[in-house]
């Protein structure tokens, strides 16, 4: 992300929130040290309705972690909101020179038949 | 071989059209005094030097990119080797200053002071042209071939521990991480003829 941005390219980070704890040190250190924009798009594992027992911890830790490291974040749950949310996140991140996280949930990440009895 | 010898060998080969990233620590001050231009991003994140250079190499395939790494930084994020070994950007050369210690915090040993071999790890991760240089002659030969070559290279320079060059205070890098970012960002904007950050837009 840092190298691509500083080379004039547009980049977003795409991951599941289960990887946030592992990825946190380079994200936080780079942004605090250099004040760098970074748009993070994550899947909101553990949001209301989670059916996997192992999924809940990722929400329980993601929310306070993002607040603790002062990364503004918003949940996006409707497909019609995806495009405008990403545009706002890019604008916000560029003008603040700071990361912004969008956490996709609800109908944005539903897989038909997956996890259903 | 001392770090400053390696820096002095590299510096004449790097032109203002090339881009460089450096690891945190003594390399900052050494390279600050030998860099040919503001073409260097002084990475303040241990573990993110190779990844930052990789982002540059993939984004700007027409430019040569040099990563001045350190053993402490590489060991903090060994997974980066695998990404590098899969991408193999032909315009990227990584030089690891490997002194086997965490020198800036007093010198406790890193794993490379015992059994860990970073060049072999890089080879196993898929990197090309991996090598360990134990003398400045070996290093010069390897570096020149890599820097002028057409494939990526990963060179581990085994440098002596506890040999920080004693720069006067005035000669040390005076900039902080945010000034470093803007120096580099504005340099790339001019070099590439692009706008990366338009500055303080306001109503």
Image (cartoon, rainbow, N blue to C red):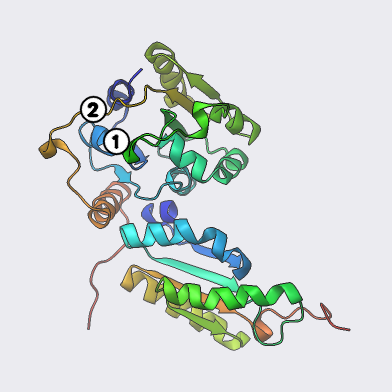
Q: Is residue A45 visible?
A: no
How far apart are labels 1 and 2 at the CA level? 8 Å
The image shows a total of numbered marks equal to 2
The answer to whether mark 1 and mark 2 are in CB contact below 8 A is yes
Query: Quick check: A35 above or below B91?
Result: below
Same chain for mark 1 and mark 2? The answer is yes
Disc 2 target residue: B165
The secondary element bearing badge 2 is classed as loop
Tell me where residue B104 appears, x and y as whole percent: 32, 39
- Which chain does tag 2 point to? B
Q: Quadrant of residue B167?
A: top left
Query: Quick check: A101 above or below B16?
Result: below
Tell me where residue A45 appears, x and y as whole percent: 65, 75
Tell me where residue B63 appears, x and y as whole percent: 40, 39
The secondary element bearing badge 1 is classed as helix
Disc 1 target residue: B26
Say which label, 1 or 2, has the lower sequence index. Answer: 1
Q: Which residue lies at the image location 84% right of the left edge and 83% below the top edge? A: A116
């Amino acid at each position: 992300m840092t190298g691509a941005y500083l080379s004039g390219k547009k980049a977003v980070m795409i991951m599941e929130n289960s990887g946030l704890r592992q990825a946190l040190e380079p994200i936080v250190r780079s942004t605090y040290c250099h004040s760098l924009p970074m748009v993070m798009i994550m899947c909101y594992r553990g949001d209301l309705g989670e059916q996997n027992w192992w999924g809940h911890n990722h929400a329980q830790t993601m929310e306070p972690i993002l607040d603790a490291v002062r990364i503004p974040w918003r949940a996006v749950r409707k497909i019609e909101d995806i495009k405008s949310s990403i545009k706002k996140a890019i604008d916000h991140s560029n003008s603040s020179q700071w990361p912004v996280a969008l956490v996709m949930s609800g109908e944005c990440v539903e897989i038909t038949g997956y996890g259903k009895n | 071989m001392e770090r400053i010898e390696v820096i002095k060998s590299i510096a004449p080969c790097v032109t203002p059209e090339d881009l460089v990233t450096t690891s945190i620590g003594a390399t900052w001050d050494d390279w600050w005094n030998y860099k040919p231009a503001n073409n260097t991003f002084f990475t303040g994140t241990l573990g993110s030097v190779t990844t930052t250079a990789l982002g540059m190499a993939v984004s700007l395939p027409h430019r040569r990119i040099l990563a001045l790494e350190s053993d402490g930084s590489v060991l903090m994020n060994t997974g980066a080797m695998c990404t590098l070994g899969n991408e193999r950007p032909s315009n990227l050369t990584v030089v690891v200053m490997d002194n086997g210690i965490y020198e800036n915090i007093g010198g406790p040993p890193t794993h490379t002071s015992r059994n860990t071999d970073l060049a072999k790890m890089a080879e196993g991760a898929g990197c090309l042209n991996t090598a360990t240089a134990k003398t400045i002659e070996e290093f010069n030969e390897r570096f020149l071939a890599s820097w002028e070559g057409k494939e990526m290279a990963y060179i581990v320079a085994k440098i002596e521990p506890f040999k920080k060059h004693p720069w006067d205070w005035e000669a040390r890098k005076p900039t902080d991480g945010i000034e470093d970012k803007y120096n580099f960002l504005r340099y790339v904007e001019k070099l590439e003829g692009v706008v990366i950050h338009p500055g303080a837009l306001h109503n």
